[in-house]
Structure formats: C-alpha cells, structure tokens
Image (cartoon, rainbow, N blue to C red):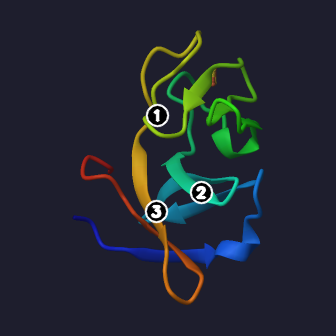
Amino acid sequence: MASWIDVARATDIPPGHAARVEVDGVPIAIFNVEGDFYALDDTCSHAEASLSEGDLDPDRCAIECPLHGSCFDLRTGEPLTLPAVEPVRVHHVEVDADGVLRVALAEDAA
Ligand code: FES
C-alpha cells in the first residue's frame, strides 16, 4: 500500500465540509459526512472542476460537481448522474489516535 501522509487535523474539516489537499502532487478532496471522512480525486473525471468546491449531499453520501452538476458517490467514486461517466479514484483516509487525518493514495494513483 502507498504510504500514509498527514494532511490536516480532523477538526479542521467539520461535518458537512470539505478541503482540498495535495498528496505526492495529487490534488485530493476530503469530505466529512457526519464524522465519517472520505478522500477522492479532487479533479472531476468530466473536466477540470474541483470537487472539493461542490455541494455535499450527506443523505446520498455524494458530492455534486460545481461545474456541470454530476454527482459522485463518496464511497465508490462512481458518477451517479451525467454528464460524467468515468469514476474518480477513492483514496484511503483515517484519523489517527492524535486526531490527525492521514491519506494514502489508491494503488493506481499517479
Ligand atoms: S467538470 Fe464535473 S461534471 Fe463537468
């Protein structure tokens, strides 16, 4: 597995919020859905929009792209609505015992 990188304190991203970080040069969007964290590629698979700037939908556990409105499932990265048809990658994220958010890139990440 890729190595874990400290990216923020968990308290920096309260429930219902998102943040954009870089891990090994890869822009990653981190979302907090009612205390559960998810990490996806920040760049939408449709064009160049930043998913961390989209609208979070906690009920569907999804993020809506701010540019053309595709929704992506935060658990799988799969698009739920058009125009995007390709998934975004989902990365590993955890909170350590000291409250630090750590991310490990998915195996296929650049
Ligand atoms: S850039 Fe995200 S749906 Fe088009």
The label number, if any, that marks residue 93 in the structure image: 3
The residue labelled by disc 2 is 36
Q: Which kind of residue does numbered mark 2 sit on?
A: Asp
The residue furthest top is: 82
Task: Give the mark, 2 or 1, whose residue is nearer the N terminus.
Answer: 2
> Label 1 belongs to which residue?
77
In this view, the mark in front (3 or 2): 2
* Residue type beneath disc 3: Val
Measure the alpha-carbon separation of dots 3 and 2: 10 Å
Residue type marked 1: Gly
Q: Circle 3 — which element? A: strand
Near-viewer residue (46 or 10): 10
Numbered disc 1: secondary structure: loop
Residue placed most toward the observer, 95 or 43: 95
Residue 101 figure quarter: bottom right
Label 2 SS: strand
User: Residue 79 location in percent, x, y?
Assistant: 51, 21
Q: Quadrant of ligand 1?
A: top right
Identify the residue at horizontal 42%, vertical 45% (top origin).
Answer: 90
Q: CA distance from mark 1 to mark 3?
A: 14 Å
Q: Going from the N terminus, do you reach mark 3 or mark 2 first?
A: 2
